[in-house]
Amino acid sequence: MAIPEEGYFKVEKGRYGAIYPRTPANYGFSVIAKVKPGREQAVRDYGKTIEDAVKGAPNVLAPLKLHYLRWVLFDVGSGLHFMYQGIFDTDFDKYIEDAVALFNATGVVSVFTNFEGWPEDWRTNTPAVIKFFREHQAPSFLEYGEYPYVTADEIKKALQLKENFSGMLDLMQ
Amino acid sequence: MLTQTPPTQTPAVGVTMESSPRLELEEIQHFLVARPAALAARYEFLSFRNPASGRKWLAGMIDKVGTAKGVHPTQLDSRWVTIAFTWNGLRALGVAEDALATFPEEFRQGMAARADILGATGTNHPDNWRGGIASSDLHAVIILFARDDKERERCRMEHEKYLTQHAGVEVLSTLDLGAIPSKRSGAHEHFGYRDRLSVPAIEGMGDEPTPGSGRRIKAGEFFLGYPDEEGEAPALPRPEILSNNGSYIAYMRLEEHVGAFRDFLKQHGKTKDEQELIAAKLMGRWRSGAPLVLSPDKDDPELGADMQRNNDFNYAKMDPHGYGCPLGAHIRRMNPRDTAANMERRRMIRRGGTYGPALPEDAPEDGVERGIAAFIGCASLVRQFEFAMNVWMNDKTFHELGNEHDPICGTQDGSLDFTIPKRPVKKKIKGLPQFSTLRGGAYFFLPAIKGLRYLSELETS
């Protein structure tokens, strides 16, 4: 699906601004922010933090309704940049507060303190955090899904069904 | 809802629990803290034609406003007064522009401007709202709870007389409310459901959460100036004397189409028992209040009336597929309990009651407007109230249902479904009728007593 430059086809108001559309790949979300000088290793260390959080509690990210998450560091010539790219089953506007709360609870939110423009009062000012994400979100202009509009829950249910069905066939041998 | 039950207990001033900061109950308006034993109510929606008149009117009203400290079951009050203002109302009283700009965007814009976000479309749209509620001329609401109709009438006349001395204060519209007579215990709304069963307990207030209601919620989720569930107190709108100890309240006047509701039950249930089951599936509780999760096959009025049991359930473990309480039922949407994240940051306090005459059983629809007119209190309209409307009530994809809104209060246009999970095959009702219509709504700020005094003493620059 090709997407206009604004990131949406028609303005549909959400609580925090225009809602980005659902595409065959569901809801893509890409935050690009410039890393403060000397903070590269601090940012990379958060990869381990999230890995440990998921190991400790496999469902810790479940509230995000996430398909995939990719964190990338790259230098575009004007300094090191961070890209947070995720594919979700929910649009940004609806569950952003839950995401911020989750980041707070797992300590992940502090990775963002390494980026330029992050609000200093982020601990008590969730609207400012949401504004940061909106301002640093780069909408896609093309999205494709090999299994269009299928949610992570549907995939998990299909796999469970397959497993249960296989088990049933085993019992019938 | 207006009720015949005794008022809720208000703790003594200075009560602190769980290391919570002391709640300034002598400052906070009683509205969201104590529920008085009122059987009647009246809302008057006001407009200030000039700042001086509005301030003078307010100055003479402040001593009639009940505080959380003052409204107490041991005191034999007969009427309880609350005053709140729209953002336009704060401006009309003379609050400075730089201070007005510090209030949250959703409050500044007002409910009518954000109707699309709430899902208030079609016949629910502000173009169809009544009583001048969608107008930028709406500046304040005075909420009167009275012990009975006689006391309400006495107060109405007294306020009418008082207004004759304040030519610059205009009444845009009014709404009278009254408890629906019922043989059953507790408050009921026009569809016949027992109401007000799920009430959050606030840290520092001394009230005990009923079993299954979750833990006490931080005061900052409801009152400005206190730590919220994030652990710190968010920055206050300026000036702090105006905002501290205040709350936001979202007003909703929701007409209930009782005739259409009863026709629907008859259409989908051959017997009385089947009709009651359909009514229960829409709500998630039997009309007695008994939750379907605990009593899925038949009503249990004793359970419904027992506050120690009627909230003691969850969804994830006890009814994950919705065979008892459908995934899209009203109570499952408006309080998903353990099937949603961050629930402590979504809780709200509802106050209000029913308006219009009750439609007698078996009487045909008479075309008279009747419904619920309530205020929903919170510390953040966008995070709490608008989230509930946008994500829970009027989101088609809630719980992956795909083509449903809240069956009781959600926006319906005849194109949506309602799914009742059932073995072996679910029942899907297509083309759900509209059982309720939003007839008015507004965002108000409910200042504390110091805030009211500040407003009454403002000077126009």
Image: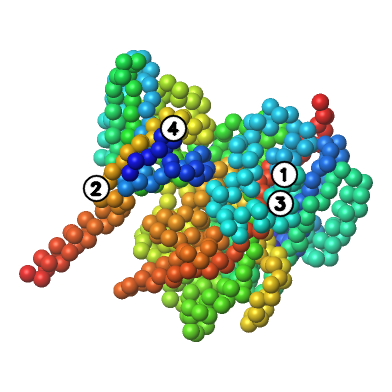
Question: Separation of disc 2 and disc 3 at Cα?
Answer: 49 Å
Label 4 crowd (10 A; few <14 / some 14-19 / many >=20): some
**Identity of the residue drawn at 29% across and 24% down:** A73
Residue placed under numbered mark 3 in the picture: B133
**Three-letter amino acid code of the residue under disc 4:** Phe
Instruction: Tell us which disc is closer to us: 2 or 3.
Output: 2
Label 1 crowd (10 A; few <14 / some 14-19 / many >=20): some
- Above or below, B274 against B388 in this view is below
Left or right? Give the position of B299 relative to B40: left
Residue placed under numbered mark 2 in the picture: A146
Left or right? Give the position of B227 relative to B143: left
The percent position of residue B41, horizontal first and vertical second, equals 75, 60
The percent position of residue B422, horizontal first and vertical second, equals 36, 72
The percent position of residue A33, horizontal first and vertical second, equals 38, 25
Work out whether residue B243 can be spotted: yes
Quadrant of the image containing the N terminus of chain B: bottom right
- Above or below, B36 against A55 in this view is below
Instruction: Tell us which disc is closer to us: 2 or 4.
Output: 2
The percent position of residue B433, horizontal first and vertical second, equals 53, 69
Q: Chain of mark 2?
A: A
Residue placed under numbered mark 4 in the picture: A133
**Identity of the residue drawn at 69% across and 27% down:** B98
**Three-letter amino acid code of the residue under disc 3:** Ile
Does dot 3 land on a helix, a strand or a loop?
A: loop
**Identity of the residue drawn at 36% across and 61% down:** B320
* C-beta proximity under 8 Å, tags 2 and 3: no
